[in-house]
Structures are given as C-alpha cells and as structure tokens.
Amino acid sequence: MSHTGQWSVRLHLFEDDDGTTKAHVTLDTGTTALTGHGTAHCNPVDTNVPEIGDELAAGRAMHDLAHQLLNAADRDVQGMAASRPSTPQAAGRPA
C-alpha cells in the first residue's frame, strides 16, 4: 500500500544576553505535535560566535525531538502487538 504524507517542522532560536542560546523545534504531523528543546552556553573565556550556539542548540533540540519520535513509534508498535488477538494453539500441541 502506497502512502504519502507531509509533516511540518518549525525551529525557533533565542539568544540571551548571557550567551545562552535556546532552540525549540516543533514537529506537526497534522494529528500530533512534538516539541524538542536544546540549549548551548558560551564559555565566558571563549569568543562568542552566535552561529556555533545556534548549531549546538538546534542540534540538541532535534536530538531531543528524535528521541521523542522514536519513543512514540515504540509505544505505537507495543500497542499494536498488545491489540493482536492471540492465536489458538493447535489441538494436541503443547503451548
């Protein structure tokens, strides 16, 4: 069976005055929305390069989102397995 779908991903980046970058990434499947979070902190002795903070925070947020998505899939698989009817054992064969 063929299946086509489209999911939307939105990534928002925020940088505080203290050199902390925060990222929120939202996956919208049309029926479910998951949000991942990530942060990056600039070491005070390092040069502040906003692009690096953005990359780290975004990558961490997407990593968080990926874990949530894999956990959701695992729960769905477990739910499918639990809803399957058990097959009766053949007569005369031990269980």
Image (cartoon, grey):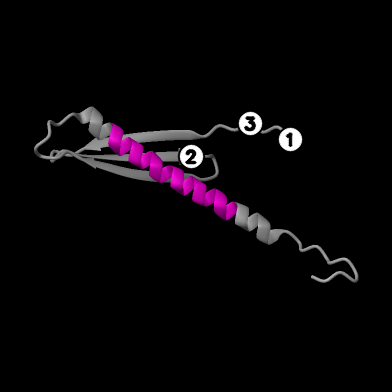
Quick check: 67 above or below 46? below
Quarter of the image for residue 49 reads top left
- Compared to 36, does 46 lie above or below? above
Find the distance from the CA under tag 3 to the CA under tag 2: 15 Å
Mark in front: 3 vs 2: 3
Which tag is nearer the camera, tag 2 or tag 1? 1
Mark 1 and mark 3: Cα distance apart in space: 10 Å
**What residue is shown with label 1?**
1
Residue 60, label in figure: none
Residue 42: image x %, image y %? Answer: 17, 38
Q: Position of residue 92 (x, y in %)?
A: 90, 71
Q: Which residue is mark 3?
A: 4
Please tell me which residue is depicted at 31% across the width and 43% down the height of the picture. 38
The amino acid beneath tag 3 is Thr
At mark 1, the secondary structure is loop
Q: Position of 1 compared to 79: left or right? A: right
Task: Tell me if mark 2 has few (under 14), some (14-19) or many (20+) residues whose alpha carbon lies within 10 angstroms of its own.
Answer: some
Rendered position, 16 above or below 89 = above
* Residue type pointed to by label 1: Met
* 17 on left or right of 66: left
What range is drawn magenta here? Answer: 55-76
Q: Magenta stretch containing residue 75, yes or no? A: yes
Q: Position of residue 44 (x, y in %)?
A: 10, 39
Which residue appears at 42% of the width and 43% of the height? 65
Residue for badge 2:
28
Few, some or many residues within 10 Å of mark 3 (<14, 14–19, 20+): few
Instruction: Count every numbered label the image shows and give the total.
Output: 3
